[in-house]
Image (cartoon, rainbow, N blue to C red):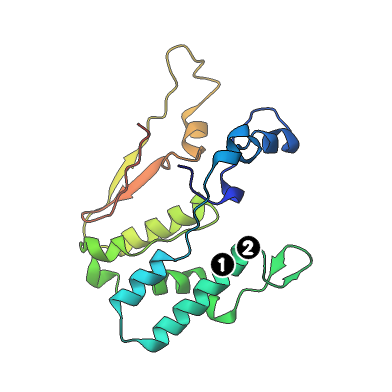
Amino acid sequence: MISGDWRQVLPVVPKRNRAQIVRSTIKCSSLWEDVEILRSTENMRVKNEKEKYPNDVELHQQLDKHEEWLLNLGENKLQSYHTNIVEIPDKMCRDSREHVVDIVFFYFKDNIGNKDYFKSRIFLAATNEVVDKINNELVAQMPGDTHTLTSVDTVGDTDNPTMFPPEFLNKQNPSGLPQHKLMLKKNTVVIFASKI
């Protein structure tokens, strides 16, 4: 079984050009003729929200419009300007990052320690730096003492320590790894992810 958006599941083929990567996809394989395609036609997030509020007709209409807009965006069916620029509806825009955070984490202080509250919220951003800044701002709003954890900032025995001083290592923020300083308080939500 293969799932996902074809635009987001290209294979990693080191040192190859675009055409060679495309030729490495499952769609170019001799196995493709035996593949049965099943399409997901229902947005489960929209369905779950509708089930939570079964009598809210206005919310259902808003969800349907939003679902249609997202689908059209993903399929490149929205009107675009200057080839790759699409207009985002005003109702989806906010004046500041702080306004977006307030909308996503409304009643934040009242829900500290409520795991169900945090399970139903997520903040995605273009860079880890933006997410880290928001996380640190939210942790600062929580009551209690801050515990600062730091990463290991030395190199292995076989490496030259003068090539990688701690100041340099502490500024690195590679994808998939936490930042050098992690500030936590009691009831801070932490997600651990590891590859098995």
Residue 94 appears in the figure: no
The circle drawn on residue 75 is 2
- Distance of label 1 from label 2 (alpha carbons): 6 Å
* Residue situated in front as seen by the camera: 110 or 195: 195
Query: Which of the image's four quarters has the C terminus?
Result: top left
| Residue at left offset 44%, top offset 53% | 132
* Mark 1: amino acid: Leu
Q: Residue furthest front?
A: 34
Return the x and y of residue 144 as percentages of the image width and height.
21, 58
Query: Which of the image's four quarters has the N terminus?
Result: top left
Are the residues flagged by discs 1 and 2 in contact, CB closer than 8 Å?
yes
User: Is 18 placed above or below 16 here?
Assistant: below
Return the x and y of residue 114 as percentages of the image width and height.
21, 64
Quarter holding residue 78 = bottom right
Image-based side of 121 in relation to 34, left or right: left
* Residue situated in front as seen by the camera: 59 or 177: 59
Helix, strand or loop at mark 1: helix
* Mark 2: amino acid: Glu
Return the x and y of residue 2 as percentages of the image width and height.
48, 43
Q: Residue furthest right?
A: 82
